[in-house]
Amino acid sequence: MARPQPPPWVHAAVLLCLLGLGGAIEIPMDPSIQNELSQPPTITKQSVKDHIVDPRDNILIECEAKGNPAPSFHWTRNSRFFNVAKDPRVSMRRRSGTLVIDFRSGGRPEEYEGEYQCFARNKFGTALSNRIRLQVSKSPLWPKENLDPVVVQEGAPLTLQCNPPPGLPSPVIFWMSSSMEPITQDKRVSQGHNGDLYFSNVMVQDMQTDYSCNARFHFTHTIQQKNPFTLKVLTTRGVSERTPSFMYPQGTASSQMVLRGMDLLLECIASGVPTPDIAWYKKGGDLPSDKAKFENFNKALRITSVSEEDSGEYFCLASNKMGSIRHTISVRVKAAPYWLDEPKNLILAPGEDGRLVCRANGNPKPTVQWMVNGEPLQSAPPNPNREVAGDTIIFRDTQISSRAVYQCNTSNEHGYLLANAFVSVLDVPPRMMSPRNQLIRVILYNRTRLDCPFFGSPIPTLRWFKNGQGSNLDGGNYHVYENGSLEIKMIRKEDQGIYTCVATNILGKAENQVRLEVKDPTRIFRMPEDQVVKRGTTVQLECRVKHDPSLKLTVSWLKDDQPLYIGNRMKKEDDSLTIFGVAERDQGSYTCVASTELDQDLAKAYLTVLADQTTPTNRLAALPKGRPDRPRDLELTDLAERSVRLTWIPGDDNNSPITDYVVQFEEDQFQPGVWHDHSKFPGSVNSAVLQLSPYVNYQFRVIAVNEVGSSHPSLPSERYRTSGAPPESNPSDVKGEGTRKNNMEITWTPMNATSAFGPNLRYIVKWRRKETRETWNNATVWGSRYVVGQTPVYVPYEIRVQAENDFGKGPEPDTVIGYSGEDLPSAPRRFRVRQPNLQTINLEWDHPEHPNGILTGYSLRYLPFNGTKLGKQMVENFSPNQTKFTVQRADPVSRYRFTLSARTQVGSGEAVTEESPAAPNEATPTAAPPTLPPTTVGATGAVSSTDATATAAAATEATTVPIIPTVAPTTIATTVATTTTTTAAVTMESPPTTETKTHESAPDEQSIWNVTVHPNSKWANITWKHNFGPGTDFVVEYIDSNHTKKTVPVKAQAQPIQLTDLYPGMTYTLRVYSRDNEGISSTIITFMTNTAYTNNQPDIVTQGWFIGLMCAIALLVLILLIVCFIKRSRGGKYPVREKKDVPLGPEDPKEEDGSFDYSDEDNKPLQGSQTSLDGTIKQQESDDSLVDYGEGGEGQFNEDGSFIGQYTVKKDKEETEGNESSEATSPVNAIYSLA
């Protein structure tokens, strides 16, 4: 029966597996092997792709290569063969491909510019260099030009253009004066990246120098200077401030392209007065802090070695106090090709498979072209063992004839990469590269490495054996590296012996032996002690050493850390140092150094030399004390499953006894490199049993402590890993809280290394609704949080978090109650507004039907209004338990609109709005008084003071706000407005006064209360109460409406305090606090100073000039009355100037002298008249009244006493009564007739 064939994908999988397992052979650098093995050429040195040369020097184009046999070289220029022998100026260095072009005998370097490529060839293949573009450096002269003075207005922006001549490479630009002094640059004046000099705003001092642009050329080492600019600044009386505008770049947006790996330089230069500041930002992210730096006074942003992540939109913001503008720069990052997998030399054994991979990336995506020995792969002879698959060449069953050099050329529009990789087929049996039968000696408990370098093709396999035994050494205390080295982590006595390394391949095997000897460490077991001796005596310092007898021991002494010269007064023995006739110069520290060729040990003591008469009572008291030296030689013994014994050797105590030892540990799984305290032991011990946790890779160190301080930590011990076990505890601090309205985030404190107890620590999270008692939901988490989604709003959950590792689960966890996310609450229920009287409004409400979370309080906004006029909106915040509030009305006319909402931690919810009921007399429109913010009284008795404005209307009675008693001291701010009415025609109305008080009960602790303010228009008197001791200083702090804060220091006995220089009609906030403790302060109160005039239209009768005028008129009336009485008594006549409607006839006897007779009987002036309170004169019994002299209207007096209506003469009784008319004339009429 025929065997079924596997599908094609099986062959592909097997092939990929073989390719993945196959590894290329590396040829050792050993010259003997290098010289023996055949090798295709490899380029080792070449010039850069863009090769710029100095025209004054000879041209050198480098190309060196290696290979066996040595390669030969030839060149192409501009893709055509370059015949070096035909040009006498061109030569090639011996055993190298480097070209030398000599111009000592003449010639122009520019004639040799072009693209060169080097070819290195031997019989096994051809290697290629990069295409080297040769260019000759150029430094052209600056064109001659005459520059007119630059005239600019002071404060205007200015750009001085450099426009340097194009050079190769580009020159370095800098600005100096014609006297070669550098131009000082700052954020106002700076040089741009293009070389121009920018002035954000020109100032007068900029005329003090001229400005010259200089160009420094690198290769020629020359500096060329442009003709200098001269500035003429036109000054003005004042420089107007201007908003910023961009000088470079123009407009509001631009774009820039940069190649990957290059530096990105963004620049923004702005003008403006004052000089703008520049700030940089990246849209949608932060600037890369590790690569970004600011240059040129923040006008330039440089990002080094850009990558694709640095693309995006950047913008610069230029701002001064007049405004700001921004410019957006769109950055696109392109990329020349860069290697992902560069092809490597492939050395194979006959019949082996291998591959060359040439994988590169770029933007745009680069194309890959394969060549072999410098020729395109398509034109090369066919090879059945070779298959090209895009960026990979696969070799199967390679043979000696497969040797060649392959080139991979990957390119895009921004550049190219060229790599050579040869394929060499070798068949070499294993060879050992190190001397045979080496002897390695090592100290007990140290770490060591046994080397066994080897080579072969195919690559041999290496194994280690000990003492000829058949078991391979790897794992546990042993570790074998890929290069063949064997590491023994901690040497023990039983590790001594002969180690054999064996390298094997299909062509044979090779072996080498290493003999390992383990030696005991060198230890000073009796150390020299600190001594205090008298001068002239003999002192002996002991130093007894234990060492390995097979090693040569050397004991030497140091004094003050310098080699000790052993003179005639000293005797050095193997175990001591004796000093005879101690002198003062012998005082110091002595160190015993015991050393072998493998290790050493030190011990130190301090010798103090005293004068003869000095006898110290305490030897250590005279010695300097210091922190102890670090413990050393840590050793782990008695290794058990949950414990280990740690032993150490104490360090020198430095004249202060060691009191404690602190043992610390470090583990390499959860917090590698972090040391934790494990335990603490008395200073008298140097060995302790440490209790360990399961599955921790421990490493220990010890710190010694004395009264001076702690020593440096000891060197760490070797590591010891305990076996694993199920966790014995669960994570702590388990919480369940919502971060959104439809989720719950479960968090906990993760367990540390000593509580994990095993690998792959994870947590089993369980949750369920508390009320429903549904089945448990669960999830396995490796972090420290888990988010439960699609939860109802704010419902309780039962939560459990249990630890688990690969050895099992931890104990049953405790149940924790958590809550899902909160949402906005519904509106408060049954919002009631009641007005028991005209002074107060009571508010009541019930809690929301759906809180949707934990209520954090209520927010109340209320607004006084009177018709279409609105007052100042007030805001009150209440605790979640408060459901009542009282508002004290400021006036009985205004109504209030209340808006109430509840709050959770998410925010304020739906609001409910109500208005206060209308007042009973609201139907009768009246002139609206100034709207006053109300004084609010809370349900707890606390009053919230608002801005109050006193009005001078009709007389008002002071109103006292009732206080609702509570447990806590309460504060009530009352505002009392008083005015006076007019009591006489000449009495001015007094200005209103405002008194602001706080009524508080006296507390038990030190405090300040009952602050009272008596303000006027420009000053205010302040008093308060306190329970401080005599002599206490206080500070009165007050802030006006413009937020200007002032303080006045006062003494305790200096009350009342007067605040002066206040502004009329301005609102102030004030508090009093202790000068020694600002935390002890009164409550903050608000008051307003009086306005300069309380009436907008002052009454004329209150003015002084009018009162004086009225007094003068009254005096004149009195004089005229006296004259009237005199004339009447004499029968005198008054001349009449009135025009008659009918002229008097000649027969009229009264006309002769143009006068009338006034009889005492017919006319009795002033009888029955009286003066009214407003200054007018009223007639009660006269036949005529002042009305008779009006023209059909009623005569009347204005408020200021002036007469209203035109005074005219009325025809009266003379038509009917003739000469017998006796018109009674009022004294006031007489006054106005004479006027």
Image (tube, grey):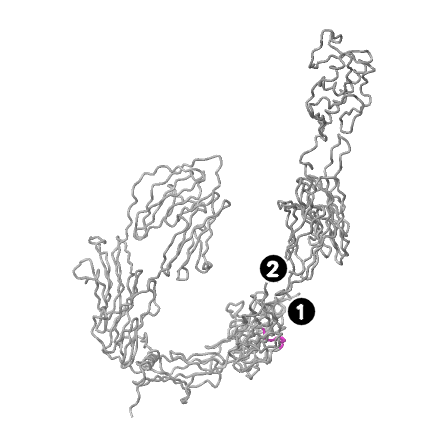
Numbered mark located on residue 910 in the image: 2
Label 2 to label 1: alpha-carbon separation: 83 Å
Q: Please state which amino acid type lies under the numbered disc 2.
A: Glu
State whether residue 1154 is above or below residue 1102.
Answer: above
Q: Residue furthest bottom?
A: 1
Q: Which residues are magenta?
A: 677-684
Report the residue at 40% width, 89% height from top.
Answer: 468
State whether residue 135 is above or below residue 667.
Answer: above
**Residue 91: which quarter of the image?**
bottom left
Question: Is residue 680 part of the magenta span, yes or no?
Answer: yes
Q: Please state which amino acid type lies under the numbered disc 1.
A: Asn
State whether residue 1020 is above or below residue 608.
Answer: above
Main structural element of the magenta stretch: helix, strand or loop?
A: strand
Q: Are marks 2 and 1 in contact (CB under 8 Å)?
A: no
In what element is the residue under mark 2?
A: strand
Q: Is residue 889 left or right of residue 352?
A: right
Name the residue that disc number 1 marks. Answer: 618
Numbered mark located on residue 835 in the image: none
* Image quadrant occupied by the C terminus: top right
Quick one: 581 or 1106, which is closer to the camera? Answer: 1106
**Residue 121: which quarter of the image?**
bottom left
Task: List x then y, in percent, for residue 1154.
Answer: 73, 9
Which mark is first along the chain, 1 or 2?
A: 1
Rate crowding at label 2 as few (under 14), some (14 to 19) or many (20 or more) other CA atoms within 10 Å.
Answer: some
Quick one: 150 or 795, which is closer to the camera? Answer: 795
* Image quadrant occupied by the N terminus: bottom left
State whether residue 752 is above or below residue 142.
Answer: below
Quick one: 325 or 624, which is closer to the camera? Answer: 325
